[in-house]
Amino acid sequence: MIKAEVAPVIAEAARNPDIYYLFEEMQANNEYTYRHNIGVGIIATYLGMKLGLSKENLSALTLAATLHDVGKTRISDSILEKPGKLTAAEYEEMKRHTIFGYELLKNIPGIPPSLALTALQHHEREDGQGYPLGLKGNDIHHHSKIVAIADVFHAMSSNRVYHQAMPFYKVIEQMNSDMFSKFNPEILLEFVSRLMSTLVGNEVMLTNGRLARSS
């Protein structure tokens, strides 16, 4: 159902040659970045629906989410795919993907301004400890707040060259601990409660390795 919401938005946006080029470049540049953007688009769309966004607002969120990391097409693969910890200089270069994304999107005609803002702000945090501008609370666009949560959840739940996917309970535990500092608590609470409700009646792996049925 969520994919059915996302696919038409991407197809419609791809009629714009500038947007089509960016999707093509993302896919050619780094497969994980492309798949991550699509995954975040699906998660953010689901969350936007549960938050009651209007159809127009939801479409803008979907497109913003699927392009949030487009700036990584300007980051070298040696940094994106480095199996070990980044050096301080490499990390500073990695953080520039937010600015690169904003620059790539800000002048494309006919698209909502939230697209460029989300690319710029999806690593900003409620307590001002994010980047690149150290924005706080109401200075961060609503779409950026939603995408930030979808982005972190997908990244922690995915295998990468430098880390294995975290167990689901660890992801939720970590995100809950950040609820009143890094993320908007209202949006995160909605997200976590929806996730937990999908597990009711399903088998889950306990910390001791045994299987149990959630209730």
Image (cartoon, rainbow, N blue to C red):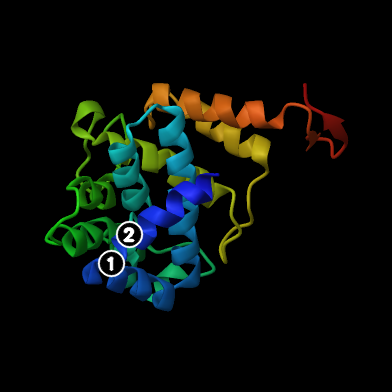
> Percent x, y for residue 140?
23, 35
Which type of secondary structure does the marked residue at label 2 adopt?
A: helix
The residue sitting at 84% across, 35% down in the picture is 208
Disc marking residue 15:
1
Query: Is 191 placed above or below 2 here?
Result: above
Residue at 44% from the left image edge and 47% from the top image edge: 151
Residue 138's place in the image compared with 141, above or below, is above
Where residue 214 appears, as percent x and y from the top left, is 78, 26
What amino acid does circle 1 point to? Arg
Q: Which residue is found at the position 27% from the left and 52% from the top? A: 119
- Taking the image as shown, residue 42 lies to the left or right of residue 181, namely right
**Which numbered disc covers residue 62?**
none
Q: Is residue 49 above or below residue 6?
A: above
Residue 114 visible in the current orientation? yes
Query: Horizontally, is 96 left or right of 209 in the view?
Result: left
Q: Are marks 2 and 1 in contact (CB under 8 Å)?
A: yes
Q: Residue furthest right?
A: 210
| Numbered marks: total | 2
The image quarter containing residue 80 is bottom left
Residue 168 lies, with reference to residue 66, above or below; the image says above
User: What residue do we see at 40% from left, 76% from top?
Assistant: 29
Out of 34 and 127, give the one closest to the viewer.
34
Query: Where, by quadrant of the figure, is residue 71 drawn?
Result: bottom left
The local crowd at label 1, few if under 14, some if 14 to 19, many if 20 or more residues have their Cα within 10 Å, is: few
The one nearer the camera, 130 or 118, is 118
User: According to the image, label 2 marks what residue?
Assistant: 12
Residue type, label 2 = Glu
Placement of the C terminus among the 4 image quadrants = top right
